[in-house]
Image (tube, grey):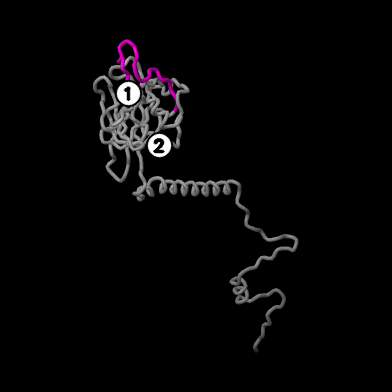
Amino acid sequence: MTSHHQAPKGNYQSRRERHTALAAPQRVRFPAWKSPPTKAPPTRAVSARLAVLNLKAVVAFVAISLLLTTYLLPAYAPSVLQSLSVTGNFAPEQAPRDQYLVTRTTLAGYQPFEHLADTFANNPNSSVQWPFAVGVPVSSWFGYRSCAGCSSDHQGIDFNPGEGTPIQAIADGIVTEVGNPNGSFGVYARISHQIDGQNITSLYAHMLEGSLALEVGDTVDKGQLVGQVGNSGQSTGAHLHFGIYLDGVTAIDPYAWLKEKVGS
């Protein structure tokens, strides 16, 4: 006699049905009144860290851009004249590469332009300038004078702005003579200029020892550093003896000549 078993009804599941139910992805249902969880927004600490990282990236980009602009790009522009200033007691010289022009800064430890005066004013549009950037006192004029320890026929004028004051070239020219120091002029330089069709020589004398910034044969520009006011050679105090010579020989009144050429 064969007996037949009938599977119970209701919540009964066979092994296959249970295995299928466990293997299937489970979907979580939430009540209508409760929304599913969402990803939490970044905290303030995380946001601040991201801001710092972004700022560092921007700073690094700007620094690299400045490096390329300042150091790398000019090196590949041979038509641009580059300059290099060297501090300390170094003789001026031409740099070994490209078109670097090496000039020296003034010696430290002095008070430039300690004395000022309304004796002249430079005209920035003029091709000729005074030997100082601003007006300074004139302690001795051109021509005859009577003073102890000095020449009676003064072939120049004496400016007295104070020891260490920088002296500038009055116009473009070429250095023809220097003394470092040498003779009664002490530390001095002569520069030859072509001005209004004339050969003019300017003289800068009694400069500070160690301040001469030029050598014979140097090409100078208007306003370029010549040296500093000093008391070298036959001198009774710190001053610049400045002279102007027609054709390099005949001394003329520098003050009157500069007044005419500069226009102020």
Disc 2 residue crowd, few under 14, some 14–19, many 20+, Cα 10 Å: some
Residues at badges 1 and 2 in contact (C-beta under 8 Å)? no
- 13 above or below 95? below
How many marks overall? 2
Check if residue 116 falls in the magenta segment: no
- Where is residue 80? Give x, y as percent: 37, 47
Q: Position of residue 26 (x, y in %)?
A: 63, 68
x 62%, y 57%: residue: 39
Amino acid type at mark 2? Ser
Q: Position of residue 111 (x, y in %)?
A: 41, 22
Q: Position of residue 25 (x, y in %)?
A: 61, 70
Q: Circle 1 sits on which residue?
A: 207
Which residue is at a point 38% across and 49% down the rendered structure image? 73
Figure check: 187 above or below 65: above
Q: From which residue to which does the magenta span run?
A: 134-156
Furthest toward the left, the residue is: 183
Image-quadrant location for residue 243: top left
SS at mark 2 in the image: loop
Residue 175 is drawn in which quadrant? Answer: top left
Q: Residue at x 40, y 27 (%)?
A: 132
Disc number for residue 13: none
Identify the element where label 1 is drawn.
strand
Left or right: residue 232 compared with residue 32: left
Please tell me which of labels 1 and 2 falls first in the chain.
2
User: Which quarter of the rendering shows the N terminus?
Assistant: bottom right
Find disc 2 in the rendering and name its residue: 127
Q: Residue furthest top?
A: 148
Please tell me which residue lies in front, 259 or 176.
259
**How many angstroms separate mark 1 from mark 2 (CA)?**
24 Å
Residue 143: in magenta span: yes
Q: Given this view, does label 1 or label 2 mark the residue nearer the observer?
A: 2
User: Mark 1 belongs to which amino acid?
Assistant: Met
